[in-house]
Amino acid sequence: MKKNILIVCDNNTLYSKLAEAYFKKYAGHWKNIFSAGINIDSVLVSETLKVILAEDNLESTIDYTLKSVKEYNLNSFDYIIALTEQSFNDLKKELPEDRIILVNIETIRGQKMNSLESINDKIKLELFEFVKKGPIKRWLELN
């Protein structure tokens, strides 16, 4: 039986959508993957998201509708992955901490990049690392 995973970021406009697409690419055959934001303050996904997904032929892997965590029954997920401290802290108000894993992408956000291409490469590398090679892969495989 496939496990249900929710990936949560602040706004669901870029990072959680990217993580959703890459999780589906690398682990979708054994996990049901969704994404959401804590505070939806936009109606559109980031243009950067579209560029990155098109580059990797992943445009059709995700729903481009922004989703709030309030739209989901959090208890229906086996695992919830928070991508920022803010989303992690907000989720802890609703769920036991052992149901949430923090994969902090703040380092990506804080870096100044010279071009859209270098931003894309950095985001993809970070997401690949935590999906395919990092401790999250072992955590998901063991559970």
Image (tube, grey):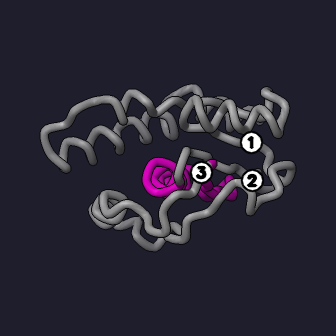
Q: Residues within 10 Å of mark 1 (few under 14, many from 20)?
A: many
Q: Could you tell me the amino acid type at mark 1? A: Tyr
Label 2 to label 3, Cα distance in Å?
22 Å
**Which of the 4 image quarters holds residue 106?**
top left
The residue singled out by tag 1 in the image is 79
Look at the numbered disc 1 and give the secondary structure of its residue: strand
Q: Position of residue 132 (x, y in %)?
A: 49, 38
Q: Could you tell me the amino acid type at mark 2? A: Asn
Q: Residue at x 64, y 56 (%)?
A: 33
The residue singled out by tag 2 in the image is 4
Q: Residue at x 46, y 48 (%)?
A: 15
The residue singled out by tag 3 in the image is 39
Q: Quick check: 14 left or right of 4?
A: left
Q: Residue at x 83, y 56 (%)?
A: 73
- Residue toward you, 82 or 22: 82
Magenta span includes 53: no
Tell which circle, 2 or 3, labels the residue nearer the N-terminal end. Answer: 2
Q: Quick check: 141 left or right of 52?
A: right
Q: Position of residue 62 (x, y in %)?
A: 52, 67
Look at the numbered disc 2 and give the secondary structure of its residue: strand
Q: Could you tell me the amino acid type at mark 3? A: Asn
Label 2 to label 1, Cα distance in Å?
7 Å
Q: Is residue 109 above or below residue 33?
A: above
Q: Is residue 53 above or below residue 31?
A: below
Per the rendered image, the range of residues in magenta is 12-38
Tell which circle, 2 or 1, labels the residue nearer the N-terminal end. Answer: 2
Magenta span includes 20: yes
Q: Residue at x 68, y 50 (%)?
A: 6
- Residue toward you, 86 or 25: 86
